[in-house]
Image (cartoon, coloured by chain):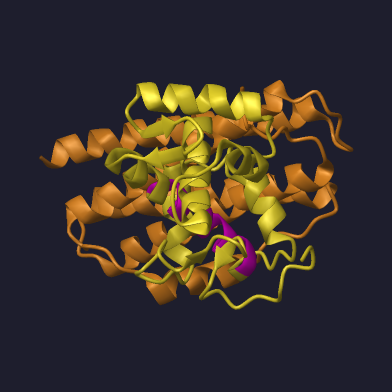
Amino acid sequence: MSLKTPVNSDHQLARLLQIGVVLEEVVEARAAKHADAAELDDDVRAFLREAAAESAIHRERLDELVAELEADSVPFDEVKQLVEQRYETGSDFDGVLYDQLCNEETAYKFYDDLIEVLEGADASFSIDRERVLAVLREIRAEEEDGVEEVTELMEAKE
Amino acid sequence: MNTANQYLKAIYLVQQIEDGPASTGAIADMLDVSPASANEMIGKLEDQELCSHEKYKGVDLTDDGIHRAREALQNYCIIERFLVEVLGVEDFRGEARQLESVIDETVADRLDTIIDREPQCPDCFHPEEDVCALLEVEADPAD
């Protein structure tokens, strides 16, 4: 038996997408903070800025879906403030890149689980499920690329 | 969180409430499943040496079972706190129960970076109230 709860309402779908938005906001805020704060090589700093920009695009795409479901997203400034309040990490290469690897892997895992749940759902939503899945699959693929990129960067710094 | 971990968490909480072995009926009630389903899963957990089940007495978690149950409970606490503190969700208990099967521990760890969780977590979890005793929320309207 399984205790997996099916996603069967606009409300539940919006909630999961909101969580995706917050995760992207966390990634964006932490990557930007690392890029500003740490003493880094130019290639690492450029990678972090690019990762922050990519997360901003992801959250905007998720935001659009959340808005179509007539729900609100958590404003970026609010999450940025929460990240600032509790920010702590090593600022050397290993700490910064390891944190970014966790960010990318976590986002990938979240989208992978969400896609699996939505693929198994037989409910209909007020927005086209296939369109939601297409967006999520594209973002998941970019997160997968991000994991590879950060891994290569870590290996190059060894 | 996978099904096995949800069971371990439920057994852990029922053991706290009953202050001893957990009855399969109470475990089934907490998870809203049939007693037959609960028995089947408890058997599987016993095979993995995560709990021991004595007929007419109840279920006891082993040390490994307790370790996994506490991790699962911590994830659940993170989800509840995140729903309250970041998203301002009123029915956070109901939604946390729905979300716990979708929110994996790596995702919970990231959400944990923006919430205000106490270091003694999950010891501060109140099993009957289904919420951290240190989280300031209004009483459950279902009570």
Q: Quadrant of the C terminus of chain A?
A: top left
In orange, which chain? A
Q: Which segment did they paint magenta?
A: B71-84
Residue A59 seen in render: no
| In the foreground, A153 or A83 | A83
Residue B118 sits above or below residue B6 on the image = below
| Relative image position of residue B142 (x, y in whole percent) | 79, 63
Residue B69 inside the magenta-drawn segment: no
| Relative image position of residue A83 (x, y in whole percent) | 45, 68
Residue A70 seen in render: yes
| In the foreground, A91 or B18 | B18
Chain B rendered in what hue? Answer: yellow
Is residue B33 toward the left or the right of residue A38 in the image? right
Is residue A83 toward the left or the right of residue A62 in the image? left
Kindly identify the residue that appears in the image at 58 percent across and 44 percent down.
B100
Residue B80 inside the magenta-drawn segment: yes
| Relative image position of residue B26 (x, y in whole percent) | 61, 44
> Given the current orientation, which residue lies at the most extreme right position?
A126
Kindly identify the residue that appears in the image at 44 percent across and 60 percent down.
B112
